[in-house]
Image (cartoon, rainbow, N blue to C red):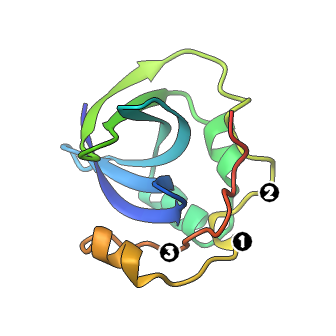
Amino acid sequence: MKLKTKTIYIYYDYPIIFSATNEFGKVFICLFADETASCLRYICSEVSVSLLENIENNKIDIRSVFEKTEKIYSLIINAQSEESIEAIEINEDISHILPEKDFFIGSQEGISNQTINNIYPDIPVTHFAVASPLPRV
């Protein structure tokens, strides 16, 4: 399964949290997990359109989305081209990757940044973080 970015919610050097769709129109929320020299790894959870709206409107925090989901996917993205390589279902403990409870995408202070809009002209970026909003693992 390949995913296409829909909206970037938090950006710091690369997308930290974003929504994406697959070839069947299903929606996913994706959270940065780790990186190598050539790839970025995200954990992704399929969400309904109404749940995505609740996430975007700060009615549900990011941690809760991943804790309540049945299927978690690992998404590998080529760090150079930022193309989705593949998303595969995983069965591993991801609690160490998740942000603290009550971490909402709209609660992060951000600045509007034209540079980011130039990098992603067709993808809305809602927050550009001046410091990493998530702890590095």
Q: Are marks 2 and 3 in contact (CB under 8 Å)?
A: no
Identity of the residue drawn at 70% across and 45% down: 63
Note whether 103 is above or below 33 in the view shown. Answer: below
Please tell me whether mark 3 sits on a helix, a strand or a loop.
Answer: loop
Residue occupying image coordinates x 72% and y 71% = 107
Figure check: 119 above or below 132: below
Amino acid type shown at disc 1: Ser
Q: Tag 2: Cα neighbours inside 10 Å, few (<14), some, or many (≥20)?
A: some
* Number of disc labels: 3
Q: Residues within 10 Å of mark 1 (few under 14, many from 20)?
A: few
The residue identified by callout 2 is: 102
Q: In the rendered image, which quarter is residue 38 located in?
A: top left
Residue type at tag 2 = Asp
Secondary structure, mark 2, is loop
Q: Secondary structure at mark 1?
A: helix
Task: Give x and y (percent) for residue 62.
Answer: 65, 51
| Image disc number at residue 126 | 3
Is residue 120 among the parts visible in the rendering? no
